[in-house]
């Protein structure tokens, strides 16, 4: 069974500061990993994904994440926070051997607050 | 092109009523997923379709939940005899190919169900 742990239900940073959102996973096989963002009353939008290619993945809006197998982590970072980054962020995993039934397993989410 | 659409966006039901939630995936997408997102939680997988075939319904919480996709495009999630614990946002997602888990799932805005 897979699981995802996101440390910190709320993270607050100042505008212009580094954003770091933590994600650790548990999986019996090397998983595919995703970060999604959710703005109020909207669906989830993919920020970036890791699918066993480069371990450092660059996504939209200046976000990136690094897959570290030894630490079973996939932390999300952005060098300089912008007010528009305020949202809910979800880390998710899927099993590459799922054979088509590839439902994602999500963490509980981290609410990112940007202080002016 | 158009994204995933869901209707209604909001639904209020009295306990014991039946409800039907509709999902229109992106045209041509083979895979369709339903998730349930309780307040303050990450989405949880309910069921998965590949074309019209329901390949995984392991996440459906009870036999009151039923999903169908008869022509391989539009899908309906039906909840019979709704209970207060069914109150949540129901998310639909679609993706373009049928296997591997690596492809981006495109999410709709969700239907917020409130059971009184």
Image: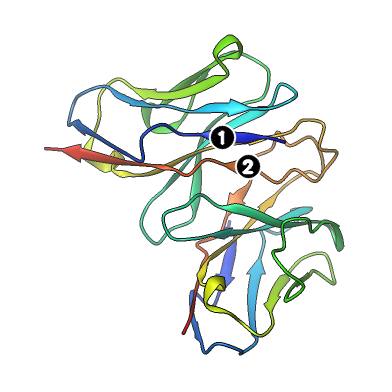
Classify mark 2: residues with Cα within 10 Å, few (<14), some (14-19) or many (20+). many
- Protein chain holding label 1: A
Q: Nearer the viewer, residue A104 or A48?
A: A104
- State the colouring used for the structure image: rainbow
User: Considering the numbered disc 1 on the image, is that residue within a helix, a strand or a loop?
Assistant: strand
Q: Residue B13: x, y in percent?
A: 52, 86
Q: Which residue: 58% across, 28% down? A: A25
**Mark 2 — on which chain does it sit?**
A
Q: Which label number is shown at residue B57?
A: none
How crowded pointer 1 is (Cα within 10 Å; few <14, some 14-19, many 20+) is rated as many
Q: Residue furthest left?
A: A116
The reply to whether discs 1 and 2 touch (Cβ–Cβ < 8 Å) is yes
Residue A85 percent location from the top left of the image:
30, 39
Q: Secondary structure at mark 2?
A: strand
Q: Is residue B20 above or below residue A27?
A: below
| Residue A87 coordinates in the image, percent (x, y) | 33, 46
Q: Which quadrant of the structure image shows residue A20?
A: top left
Total numbered circles:
2
Left or right, A43 with respect to A86, comes to right
- Closer to the chain start, of discs 1 and 2, is 1
Q: Quadrant of the N terminus of chain A?
A: top right
What label does residue A4 carry, if any?
1
Residue closest to the eye, A68 or B22: A68
In the picture, measured across the screen, residue A109 lies left or right of residue B72, that is left
Same chain shared by disc 1 and disc 2: yes
Q: Is residue B79 above or below residue A100?
A: below
Task: Tell me the quarter of the picture where residue B104 sits.
Answer: top right
Q: Is residue B76 left or right of residue A33?
A: right
What residue do we see at 51% from left, 72% from top? Answer: B87
Closer to us: B104 or B112: B112
Q: Which mark is residue A105?
A: 2
């Amino acid at each position: 069974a897979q699981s995802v742990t996101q440390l910190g239900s709320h993270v607050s940073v100042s505008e212009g500061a580094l954003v770091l959102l933590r994600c650790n996973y548990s999986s019996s096989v090397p998983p595919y990993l995703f970060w999604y963002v959710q703005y109020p009353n909207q669906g989830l939008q993919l920020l970036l994904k890791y699918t066993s290619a480069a371990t450092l993945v660059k996504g939209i809006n200046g976000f990136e994440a690094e897959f570290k197998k030894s630490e079973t982590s996939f932390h999300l970072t952005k060098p300089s926070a912008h007010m528009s980054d305020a949202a809910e962020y979800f880390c998710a995993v899927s099993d590459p051997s799922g054979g088509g039934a590839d439902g994602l397993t999500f963490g509980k989410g981290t609410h990112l607050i940007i202080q002016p | 092109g158009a994204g995933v659409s869901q209707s209604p966006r909001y639904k209020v039901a009295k306990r014991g009523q039946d409800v039907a939630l509709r999902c229109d995936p992106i045209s041509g997408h083979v895979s369709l997923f339903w998730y349930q997102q309780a307040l303050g939680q990450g989405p949880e997988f309910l069921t998965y379709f590949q074309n019209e075939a329901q390949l995984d319904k392991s996440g459906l919480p009870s036999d009151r939940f039923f999903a169908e996709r008869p022509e391989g495009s539009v899908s309906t999630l039906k909840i019979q005899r709704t209970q207060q614990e069914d109150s949540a946002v129901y998310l639909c997602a679609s993706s373009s190919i049928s296997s591997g888990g690596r492809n981006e799932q495109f999410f709709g805005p969700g239907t917020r169900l409130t059971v009184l």
